[in-house]
Amino acid sequence: QVLVGIAIDGEAAAGAIGIPFPDGTLETEPTIIYGLDGIGSGVIGSFLTRGPYPLERNIDGVKYPRPHHATGDSTAEVMEACRRGAIKGIGGSTVIYGGAGSKILAA
């Protein structure tokens, strides 16, 4: 995956996510999802067939209260500390998604 973000004066202005194998095979053309603040967003190439977001397993609002903190499955202590800090600071729950682009799309 390729992620590009553009900020102007510290504020997010635009971004794009490139997903080279949207269905996990070489059979489907890549997907590019883009957005420009105040203009809109779109998709070039194959539409993603994965989803829905949040993933079905994370829809249970009791088991996974919002906001969702999209994360990976790293067990590094620094990541565990970040997860705990996010939940302590603003509540919610952590949910595990795939690559970085999947986490952004899930947010």
Image (cartoon, rainbow, N blue to C red):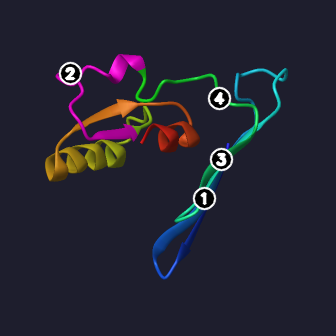
User: Considering depth in this image, is 35 or 102 the residue closer to the camera?
Assistant: 35
Q: Which residue carries the number 3 mark?
A: 42
In the drawing, does residue 59 fall left or right of residue 102? Answer: left
In the drawing, does residue 68 fall left or right of residue 53? Answer: left
Q: Earlier in the sequence, mark 3 or mark 2?
A: 3
In the drawing, does residue 74 fall left or right of residue 90? Answer: right
From the image, state whether disc 1 or disc 2 is nearer to you: 1
Q: Secondary structure at mark 1?
A: strand
Q: Earlier in the sequence, mark 3 or mark 1?
A: 1
Q: Which residue carries the number 2 mark?
A: 63
Residue 15: mark: 1
Numbered range of the magenta stretch? 56-70
Disc 3/disc 1 C-alpha distance (Å): 11 Å
- The percent coordinates of residue 37 (x first, y second) are 53, 64
Residue displayed at 43% across by 31% down: 73
- The percent coordinates of residue 89 (x first, y second) are 16, 53
Q: Which residue carries the number 4 mark?
A: 48
Residue displayed at 45% across by 37% down: 106
From the image, state whether disc 4 or disc 2 is nearer to you: 4
User: Considering depth in this image, is 55 or 86 the residue closer to the camera?
Assistant: 55
